[in-house]
Image (cartoon, rainbow, N blue to C red):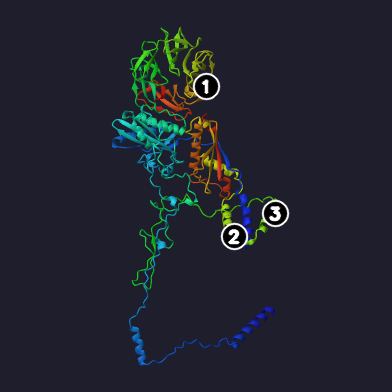
């Protein structure tokens, strides 16, 4: 019997030994996934008092709207929620959020003491049950609740996508009202989402093309106040403007700050010829950057300040060129069909956004800085004037509809070409300039 | 006259002869019931009838209380200690380096004081991204209670009030009505749906016979033989043999089988890719290739804590982190109910490494 058992044991050992042998893990490679908005849930933030209840509700709604508005996220309606978050510090019942397929969960709490508002929040990766980043707290005044909501959104966005947000930022634009032939234009500033519109000028003179300074404290714009286009710089907080001392007796327009904010580059018409100039803001001295009989305009610095992209018709049609920031030989980068204009260098430095007119249609597009990989993101009767979000992911621009009753509206689009949507403004809007993230 | 007729005639004659002469109709005496009667006298009769009317005298027996089947009625301890509901954890300790108050310039003292509340609360429901292992597998039950209740004994009827079984005891002083044992309804603290099948204890498949192995190397064979011979049978401890057998059987419960076919690999790849959502990834993360490793249970669920980034290339640490998180979401989300993989090849897919290459998913 023993001999039999021993034999059996040995037999089994021999049998099982090779069974356990394997050549390491199973290796697979994936190169195809899906591209769709990431489902997330923002249960109403928990208020610490009755006074905080409305803020808690409003802040969570703004956070949800911010994230949904990117097109990268999809909010799961609270109707689908299985569990309620009644305490900020209570453990998250991940199973309940998994059950409704929420990939990300944002929980928060709001505290109001007098006019002081405190918002705490956390971001959770539901399926791994882990927190993304650490809990964070913002404090401010109750009047600034919207900004605090945007700050929460920025954090959530960057923790999930890995790139900076753009919600706590402002956009300067030209507010347009009235019929097309008698349009009233005012310089205005608003939150990125169209809230909190403030008017910076009256409608007495035509204003054009506001441009934020890199820190967002000043605006350059062009006004026809004197009958001729002149460049002004406006202190946003004090709403105080100063005319820039460009070489006299001429028209100047299309200004833009350098990345360090110390100088501006602009177009100047002298003797019927339009060239690019650069002005040192401290000294007020201007130097010429281009000197050709062609029209050079719409200059924009690279983020490192070493190069300028601009529009020139020196080849016969408006095309895009890049030159060193102090002038010098320009290199043409656009070679497609049609006319190119209003180039804007991305804050990330990798792309240039532009307006393209081809076959009677206008497009907003992007291309690499060497002109390669041109992609048109939009197409309409009239699209123009792109401006980049602070994180270089979204482009805002003007879209104007056809006809006498045509109206200018601000639109935004993801650089992938998805998520094209209008930006709500009280009246019509044009010439947007997206400012930096606020501190 | 043909043979058939002859045979028939002979048979008939024989039958008739046997019927007439063979005693077919001989009757036998029927079995008769015989009652023996004895004659009794009047005295004897009286004595007998008196005895019948006399009260029964019970035999004095030490009365035993009805035996209470304590071991059956007492609710057994919860099946799995691990499955008891988690207790509320006290708020965590303060985290000194928490970022305070990014909105207002100088953080006020009380803000710093509040910081502790921002520490990650210990997730009490210790989240297992995958189903618990076999030892922690909850029993399926459709009732959820704060505390799990073990299944009733097989003979007990579910009842709200638990009642011990009582049976008739002839010797009992007060005769109780016989009643069946009941027990509370089985309950658990977790809903396990049908979809989340409980793990079977027994192996579902037996190992496939492997391909005919190469002839064992002669030295090994002699070694085995020597070992066999040198071990005296008397030295074989029976318990050791049983242990070894159990071990061997356990090991063999992880079937290996042949390598996965390309179709099976494609199915797995497709299953994960359906949840690999790169729509929210930054452009940097879309340049980053990550290799993610994890282990699966025999029913195809991701073993908690085994998910890890093995390698990354083409991006910064930050973008690799985002890319890994998207990959992790994909693996966990699509594997929530377990991946469908051939059970007989478990050893082949027990450990998996997936390379997530977003090259074709980039914005173009």
Crowd around label 2: few <14 · some 14–19 · many ≥20 (10 Å):
few
Proximity of marks 2 and 3: CB atoms separated by less than 8 Å: no
Residue occupying image coordinates x 61% and y 85%: B16
Q: Nearer the viewer, mark 2 or mark 3?
A: 2
Secondary structure of the residue carrying tag 3 is: helix
The reply to whether label 2 and label 3 mark residues of one chain is yes
Task: Describe the element under mark 2 as helix, strand or loop.
Answer: loop
Q: Are marks 3 and 1 on the same chain?
A: no
Name the chain under label 3: B
Residue at mark 3 to residue at mark 1: CA–CA distance: 74 Å
**x, y percentage for residue B54?**
33, 83
Spatial CA distance of label 2 from label 1 is 80 Å
In-image side of A191 versus B321 (left or right): left
Can you tell which mark lies on residue B237?
2
Tell me the residue that label 3 is attached to. B222
Residue A407 appears in the figure: no
Q: Nearer the viewer, mark 3 or mark 1?
A: 3
Query: Residue lying furthest right in this view?
Result: B218
* CB under 8 Å between discs 2 and 1: no
Q: Nearer the viewer, mark 2 or mark 1?
A: 2
Question: What x and y, as percent, mark residue A214?
Answer: 42, 20
Task: Indicate which disc, 2 or 3, sits on the residue closer to the N terminus.
Answer: 3
What mark, if any, has residue A369 been given in the picture?
A: 1
Apparent side of residue A217 relative to residue B17 in the rendered image (left or right)? left
Figure check: B175 above or below A96: below
Q: Nearer the viewer, residue B224 or A237?
A: B224
Residue shown at 44% from the left, 22% from the top: A387
| Secondary structure found at label 1 | loop
Is residue B1 positioned above or below A134 on the image? below
Give the crowd class for mark 3: few <14, some 14-19, many >=20 residues within 10 Å: few
Report in which chain the residue with disc 2 lies. Answer: B
């Amino acid at each position: 019997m023993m001999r039999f058992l021993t034999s059996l044991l040995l037999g089994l050992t021999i049998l099982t030994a090779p069974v356990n042998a394997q050549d390491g893990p199973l290796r697979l490679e994936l190169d195809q996934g899906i591209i769709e908005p990431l489902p997330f849930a923002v249960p109403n933030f928990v208020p610490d008092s009755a006074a905080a209840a409305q803020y808690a509700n409003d802040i969570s709604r703004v956070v949800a709207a911010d994230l949904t508005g990117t097109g990268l996220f999809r909010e799961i309606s609270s109707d689908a929620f299985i569990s309620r978050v009644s305490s900020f510090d209570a453990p998250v019942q991940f199973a309940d959020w998994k059950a409704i397929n929420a990939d990300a969960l944002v929980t928060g709490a709001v505290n109001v003491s007098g006019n002081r508002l405190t918002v705490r929040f956390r971001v959770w990766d539901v399926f791994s049950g882990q927190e993304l980043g650490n809990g964070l707290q913002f404090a401010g005044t109750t009047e600034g609740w919207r900004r605090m909501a945007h700050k929460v959104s920025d954090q959530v966005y960057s923790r999930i996508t890995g790139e900076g947000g753009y919600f706590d930022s402002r956009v300067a634009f030209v507010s347009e009202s009235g019929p097309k032939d008698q349009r009233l234009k005012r310089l205005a500033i608003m939150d990125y989402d169209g809230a909190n519109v403030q008017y910076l000028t009256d409608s007495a003179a035509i204003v054009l093309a506001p441009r934020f300074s890199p820190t967002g404290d000043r605006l350059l714009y062009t006004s026809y106040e004197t009958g001729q286009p002149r460049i002004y710089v406006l202190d946003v907080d004090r709403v105080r403007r100063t005319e820039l001392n460009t070489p006299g007796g001429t028209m100047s327009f299309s200004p833009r700050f350098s990345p360090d904010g110390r100088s501006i580059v602009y177009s100047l018409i002298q003797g019927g010829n339009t060239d690019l100039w650069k002005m040192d803001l401290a000294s007020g001295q201007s130097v010429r950057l281009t000197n050709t009989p062609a029209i050079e305009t719409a200059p924009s610095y690279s983020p490192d300040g070493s190069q300028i992209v601009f529009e020139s018709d020196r080849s016969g049609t408006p095309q895009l060129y890049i030159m060193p920031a102090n002038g010098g030989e320009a290199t043409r980068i656009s070679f497609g069909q049609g006319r190119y204009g209003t180039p804007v260098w991305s804050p990330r430095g990798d792309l240039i956004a532009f307006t393209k007119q081809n076959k009677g249609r206008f497009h907003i597009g992007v291309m690499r800085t060497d002109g390669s990989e041109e992609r048109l993101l939009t197409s309409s009767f009239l699209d123009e004037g792109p401006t980049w979000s602070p994180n270089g992911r979204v482009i805002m621009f003007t879209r104007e509809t056809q006809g006498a009753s045509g109206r200018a509206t601000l639109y935004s689009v993801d650089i992938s070409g998805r998520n094209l949507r209008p930006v709500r403004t009280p009246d019509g809007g044009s010439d947007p300039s997206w400012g930096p993230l606020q501190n | 006259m043909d043979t058939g007729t002859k045979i028939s005639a002979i048979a008939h004659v024989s039958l008739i002869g046997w019927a007439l002469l063979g005693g077919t109709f001989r009757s036998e005496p029927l079995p008769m019931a015989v009652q023996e009667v004895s004659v009794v006298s009047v005295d004897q009769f009286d004595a007998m009838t008196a005895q019948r009317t006399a009260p029964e005298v019970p035999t004095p027996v030490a009365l035993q209380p009805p035996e209470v089947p304590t071991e059956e009625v007492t609710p057994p301890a919860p099946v799995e200690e691990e499955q008891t509901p988690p207790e509320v954890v006290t708020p965590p300790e303060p985290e000194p380096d928490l970022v305070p108050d990014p909105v207002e310039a100088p953080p006020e003292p009380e803000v710093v004081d509040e910081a502790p509340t921002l520490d990650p609360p210990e997730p009490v429901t210790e989240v297992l991204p995958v189903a618990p292992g076999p030892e922690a597998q909850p029993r399926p039950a459709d009732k959820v209670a704060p505390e799990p209740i073990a299944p009733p004994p097989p003979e007990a009827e579910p009842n709200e009030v638990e009642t011990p079984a009582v049976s008739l005891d002839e010797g009992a002083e007060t005769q109780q009505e016989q009643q069946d044992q009941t027990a509370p309804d089985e309950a658990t603290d977790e809903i396990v749906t049908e979809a989340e099948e409980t793990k079977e204890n027994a192996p579902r498949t037996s190992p496939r016979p492997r391909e005919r192995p190469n002839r064992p190397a002669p030295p090994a064979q002699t070694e085995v033989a020597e070992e066999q011979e040198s071990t005296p049978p008397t030295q074989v401890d029976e318990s050791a043999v049983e242990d070894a057998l159990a071990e061997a059987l356990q090991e063999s419960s992880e079937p290996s089988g042949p390598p996965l076919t390309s179709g099976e690999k494609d199915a797995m790849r497709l299953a994960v890719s359906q949840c690999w959502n790169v729509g929210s990834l930054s452009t940097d993360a879309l340049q980053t290739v990550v290799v993610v490793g994890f282990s699966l249970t025999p029913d195809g669920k991701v073993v908690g804590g085994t998910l890890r980034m093995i390698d990354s290339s083409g991006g910064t640490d930050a973008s690799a982190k985002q890319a890994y998180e998207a990959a992790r979401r994909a693996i966990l989300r699509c594997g929530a109910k377990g991946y469908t993989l051939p059970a007989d090849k478990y050893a082949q897919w027990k450990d998996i490494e997936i390379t997530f290459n977003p090259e074709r998913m980039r914005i173009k």
